[in-house]
Image (spheres, rainbow, N blue to C red):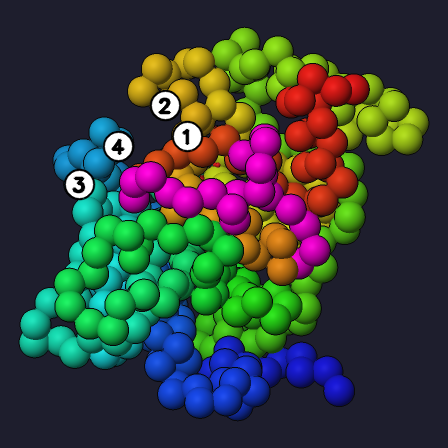
Amino acid sequence: MSSYGMTIIEHLLMKQQQIPFATGAFSRLMSELVVAAKLISREVNKAGLVDIYGFTGEINVYGEQVQKLDEYAHKTIIRRLRHTGVLCAIISEESADIMEIPEPFSRGPYILVMDPLDGSSNIDVNISIGTIFSVYRRKEEGGPVTLDEVLQKGSEQVAAGYFIYGSSTMMVYTTGQGVHGFTLYPSIGEFLLSHENIQIPKRGKIFSVNEGNYNYWDENVREYVDYLKTPEAGDGRPYTSRYVGSLVSDFHRNLLKGGIFMYPADSKDPKKPHGKLRLLCEASPLAFVVEKAGGYASNGKKPILDIKPNNIHERVPLYIGSVEDVKMAEKFLRGER
Ligand code: P6P
């Protein structure tokens, strides 16, 4: 029986009933995250009408200007989730360090990792942007949250997903049993199941990469991208290039249609030898989603989900999407043809 049209809360409770000894803590976490996303969606969709465009004047941990909506998203998620009693810490792309849940709030077993508003450089040109999230379970029973509890491999995630604020607002998430998409119906303020058990095609016809960095790539990366533009790559037709410059948008399109998104290491910025994208807040959550949808994510050499972070804001090269496409990229990067 199709569950089409089921609310996200119904879906969470249905999944919860399938887990023995489930306490409801995870469902509580996710339901508050959904409320935060509805608030962010409302601000994103009216950004053009009020003074919420533009910059706060602050610089984040990466030396990037903080957009007002970045800050709004970051604070909204923290405000909604810190009182739930199910979190012990939050890691945000907008914060340099671990944010432990402070007194007087009660704490729980989960650690939330998030990119509150990815692609924010696209806000003022009306391109879709997104929130990326990931949930881990802490290893200790109590006490201060240690760095080791946060720096877990992506394979240890309890759940991961994203919200995309585009022509419609969607939520895509997995707890390991399938990947499911929900579309927000603003008239009723509910996310309803619209894409049940998403499976990414084993091979696509789309490649997504910023070719402005071509001259700064390793030779093998250039050879792979050049190959994709030949008829041989697509059984008589070259691949199509699609690149929005908003990770959640590029990822979501390829998840549904198939293909590969790449952010290779490049020599453009000596401070970012491993590319621009962050392991904890971006690569690992999307790798968890894509692999539960039958796809694959790699740093060009090994699965993203097998990489134990060395620090909270570690960057990695990212090759993610259809399994055959990512495996082909790995082959080229090994110098094989
Ligand atoms: P570039 C947005 O700033 C972001 O973090 C991702 O959303 C996006 O995929 C990437 O950077 C785009 O980077 O260097 O191609 O502009």
Tag shown at residue 276: 1
Q: Quadrant of the C terminus?
A: top right
In front: label 3 or label 1: 1
Farthest residue, direction left: 104
- Which of the marked residues, 3 or 1, is nearer the chain's N terminus? 3
Tag shown at residue 62: 4
Identify the residue at image location x=45%, y=33%: 316
Check if mark 3's residue and mark 2's residue have beta carbons within 8 Å: no
Q: Amino acid at mark 2?
A: Lys
Crowding around mark 1 (Cα neighbors within 10 Å: few <14, some 14 to 19, many 20+) is some
Q: Quadrant of residue 145?
A: bottom left
Instruction: From the image, tell me which residue sits under label 3.
Output: 56
Q: Amino acid at mark 1?
A: Lys
Q: CA distance from mark 4 to mark 3?
A: 15 Å
Q: Nearer the viewer, residue 303 or 274?
A: 303
What secondary structure prevails in the magenta region?
Answer: loop
User: Is residue 188 magenta-colored?
Assistant: no
Question: Where's residue 176, x and y in %?
Answer: 57, 67
Check if mark 1's residue and mark 2's residue have beta carbons within 8 Å: yes
Instruction: From the image, tell me which residue sits under label 2.
Output: 272
Q: Amino acid at mark 3?
A: Thr
